[in-house]
Amino acid sequence: MPNNHSTEGFPLSCDRCLNELRPGEGNFYVVRIEAVADPSPPVITAEDLQRDHRAEMESLFVEMQNLSEQELLDQVYHRLTLYLCGSCYQCWIQDPMGR
């Protein structure tokens, strides 16, 4: 879990190895990742137009009632900031998917 620290006035550590990072010394990288749900318009078929949309919406609202506002937002948008030391950055940039 990223440490979410500011680079001003707070201890900062690498999100991967936990080594101390010292702002201003050029010994770390800030990696910003933004994930957005598919932004393309939906493909609507003739079959889609025949479905009971009211029942589908009601079912969706029932499902949503059990989720927090953050859980709902995370399904469409999520932003993450990682602080990585030079060594961990090199490992990450060579294999960001961790394969």
Image (cartoon, grey):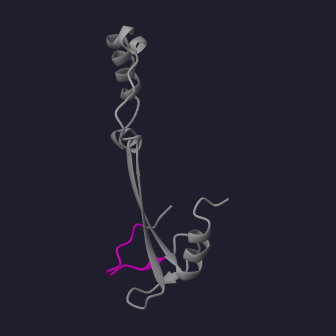
Left or right: where 87 falls relative to 4: right
Q: Residue 94 appears at what percent x and percent y?
A: 61, 70
Question: What is the residue that sits farthest to the bottom in this orientation?
Answer: 25
Taking the spot 56% from the left edge, 70% from the top edge, the residue there is 93
Question: Splitting the image into 4 quarters, where does residue 70 fall?
Answer: top left
Q: In the picture, residue 98 is in which quadrant?
A: bottom right
Q: Which residues are magenta?
A: 4-13
Would you say the magenta stretch is mainly helix, strand or loop?
A: loop
Q: How many numbered badges does the structure rendering display?
A: 0
Quarter holding the C terminus is bottom right
Quarter of the image holding residue 33?
bottom left
Q: Nearer the viewer, residue 54 or 1?
A: 54
Image position, residue 38 (x, y; %): 41, 41
The residue closer to the viewer here, 22 or 54, is 54
- In reply to whether residue 11 is colored magenta, the answer given is yes
Q: Residue at x 38, y 42 (%)?
A: 76
Asked if residue 46 lies in the magenta stretch, the reply is: no
Q: Position of residue 37 (x, y in %)?
A: 40, 42
Residue furthest out toward the right:
99
The answer to whether 35 is drawn above or below residue 73 in the figure is: below
Q: Position of residue 78 (x, y in %)?
A: 39, 51
Q: Is residue 27 above or below residue 12?
A: below
